[in-house]
Image (spheres, rainbow, N blue to C red):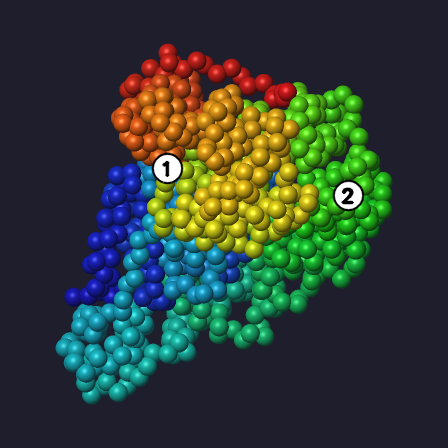
Amino acid sequence: MVGRGAEALLEREDEISQLRRAVGDSWDGVGRLVLIEGPAGIGKTSLVAAAREMSAEVGMNVRAARGAELEQSFAFGVVRQLFDSLLAGTGDAQRGRWLTGAAELAAPLFDPRAAMEEPDGDAIYPRLHGLYWLCSNISRERPLALLIDDAQWADEPSLAFLGFLARRLEELPILLAAAIRVVEADAPESLQALRVDPAAHFLKPRGLSADSIKQVLSGQIGGEVQERFARACHEATAGNPFLVGELVRELQEGGVAPLDANAAEIGTLVPQRVADAVLARLRRVSPSAPSLARALAILGDGASVRHAAALAEVDEQTAIETAAAMRAGNLLGDEGGLSFAHPIIRAAIYHSVLPAERPALHAQAARLLHERGATPERIAAQILLADEIREPWMAEQLRLAAASALALGAPRSAASYLQRALALEPDDSDRAPLLARLGHAEVLAGLPEAEEHLWAAVHFAGDADERAEVAIELAQLFKYTARAPRAVELLSDLPPAKESALNERVQTEILSAALISDTAHELLADRLAALKPPAGYARSDRERLELVVVAFERLLANRPKGDLLELLARAGPGPAWTEERILLPPGLITAAAMLSYCDQLDEAEALCNAVIERSRKRGSPTSLSIALPLRAQLAYRRGDLSDALADAEAAFQLASDAGAASDALGLNPLATIANVAVEQQRADSELQELLARTDRTLDRDTLHVNLTLQARARLLLALGRAREALDQLLEFARLPPTFATRTPAFIAWRSDAALIMHHLGDRAEAERLAAEEVALAQQMGAPRAIGIALRAHGLVQDPSSIEVLREAARVLERSPARLEHARALVDLGATMRRTGERAASRTPLRDGHDLAVLCGAARLAERARQEIAASGARAAPVGTRGVASLTPSERRVAELAAQGSTNRDIAQTLFITEKTVETHLGHVYDKLGVRSRHSLRDLLPQPDARASPTFG
């Protein structure tokens, strides 16, 4: 006997089994992502309910939510459904434990008053990071099940969180299960990303068979169900469980017996027929049911009885009784508040309201919610659907909703509210601040309309100060989108502001454009030529930037490194670069980069670390995505390939999350990933993929092109395509004059090109180019650059010069560039072997081999082993033991562990996962020959508090 509603789980044994397995894995600490996908009515909700029951049975902390069409603009609406009641229903101590550490970044999501006091969020990242740690904290006490029905209607910030969590799920005791309709091509990117997650396990329930439908009919109508009648029911519903249930109700109410003679009466259960049946059932429930259902369809699922009753114009007691009757008739679900039993029911009722009538009803709902003190977001959701209806209070509610959304890191939602507010604001005098706010939200959301609205805000600005504020934001947009010359032109045309600090900011923005764009540099040529560095130490952001710009000019002229370091020392001592008030001071990243070109890697890393630490503390993905790629390059220059890869991959993920994987924010870390892949001797298929991912139209106006060109050349060379690699490197000679990088301290492209030319037989040009690089490197004076140039020059001479190679190795030994030192040693040893010094060659070969192994440079280590074997000896044992063998990341983790930090504390401090901490500690224990963190205290000196960086 099959009871009512059981049709949804018929023929679902396989899906139930897979859900049970996912629940078990999650309970055991291996998180699982399950996506239940299919058309409306196929039984997704029933499978979510089954997952809920299974999770509760084993003792998981079960949290459920449901997406709603009307609430897609409500930032983090689904997330709030998941956690609001849990956090509200617990004591302060418990709530404090859950929202401790990095999870505190999520706290404003659950406290509207706190959210309104937050500054504008820098995109969405800090909230996602906080929510991840909230889930981690909750699941530590009891495994967590997060179940979302109708996820295709979830708001974008919530979808972004689901994707963020899914990518980090495996190491947490969390089940994440979401039901989604078949995803269309125009679905939100965050939903598409969730679907293509490699860890996603799909359940795709099919329609019921004719036999199962026959079983349902027999159980609910009774008597023998004849074959042709059952087949007709199957054809009418296509086996859709929801439609089967609706058909059974129709048959019961019409007194139709399941006989073959009645098969012709079945027909096809088209949407209109379903809608008519639902409306007929409503009328039979009670006289007030249609109006209450219509009010609920307008307000959206989860509405309170009080609000629904007021909109339906019935008293609350009548509404309560009517809602109970609607639940008994399977029209409403059992969730808190009022919610329809199925989206199809809500759609049928909503679409029964004439389109011309809906805006007025939504305006009425907005008015009601406003009068009764609802949150601005709920009011705004109704205003968005009220079309052209205007009321004086509406624009202010939209502004408040936008402010809340911005504070929570949901700028796309804020933009939709402000766009509507703009349409309600006819007075030009009020449009400028609204346009500026809208443009600001669109900048954060990465929407293309930002430029248009910020230009309009500049035009409508009421005074010079307001115009300068907006123009600075527009100029920053131009700079971040590789249009720095437009930023210079815009800001140069501004009238002076009344406030001197604003004028200072304008001049700082203009000057900083010269650091990132060749064209902007040319536009500012006269100003740069006349620029005199301030005397003494910098006393302001502008003076600090002026010192950096003058140092940059000296770098472009390939002046001695001491000239650069003297200026940078005056820009950077004391708290100047690292004070808390400024997240990313103008010129800081350029200063750090120039320090690295001068081989001051520790000082450069200190600056990057200061920015990264503040960015993580304050949740700023923008500054993090700028500082992480540079720190990755520092690690690569040092020869710490694992650290370089970790930072580069984290930066690329940030760029991808921001939709900027193909821009400079994505290409910079991708260049480091490519370089590391070559050194680690990754498979050709992986190198081919990286080559394809870096195949972009490169903007030759910026410095970013240099890293990508060199990385592509190295990929091509590793793939055996030497001629194409050389073509890439010779592009440097065709770059704009400013950023053609005369100095090899930045990119040693001449050395790379000379080695390929020599290989291809153009030996004279190879020697000329290598000699030019040696002269330039010695003029600038950075040991790494000199050593690289000497190595290339020694190799392209005919025959190769052992003395030049020996000098290259000596110079590089004095530099922090371990990988380049290893390369020079291997080349020295190989050349000595080829010239008959087989026994003597083994020392540099073994030293180079051990250094290469320490760096993780598998390609170079393999070549060294081959050369050692060719010398008639065996490769020395790999020297990867002791404190000196730890990579900087391993060292950071080990030091924190030695100080007593837990894995969890370390993960939050370093912005990595606990699994990564465990991996690093495993390597540390192995290299140091210990078994626990307690032994680390004796082996590792406790780090001193790091002072503000000084240079020179």
User: Left or right of 694: which side holds 742?
Assistant: right
Provide residue 214's location: percent of width, then percent of height: 19, 74
Q: Residue furthest top?
A: 938
For the question of whether residue 700 can be seen, the reply is yes
Task: Find residue 266 and report its image quarter.
Answer: bottom left
Q: Nearer the viewer, residue 520 or 236?
A: 520
For this view, does 826 lie left or right of residue 621? left
Left-right relation of 539 to 23: right
| Front-most of residues 404 and 113 | 404
x, y percentage for residue 240?
A: 30, 70
Q: Amino acid at mark 1?
A: Arg
Q: Residue 215 location, x and y as percent? A: 18, 70
* Residue found 27% across the figure and 48% down from its top: 22
Residue on which disc 1 sits: 859
The 10 Å Cα crowd at callout 2, few under 14, some 14 to 19, many 20 or more, is some
- Indicate left or right for 631 with 132 as reference: right
Furthest toward the left, the residue is: 224
Q: Earlier in the sequence, mark 2 or mark 1?
A: 2
Q: Which residue is mark 2?
A: 524
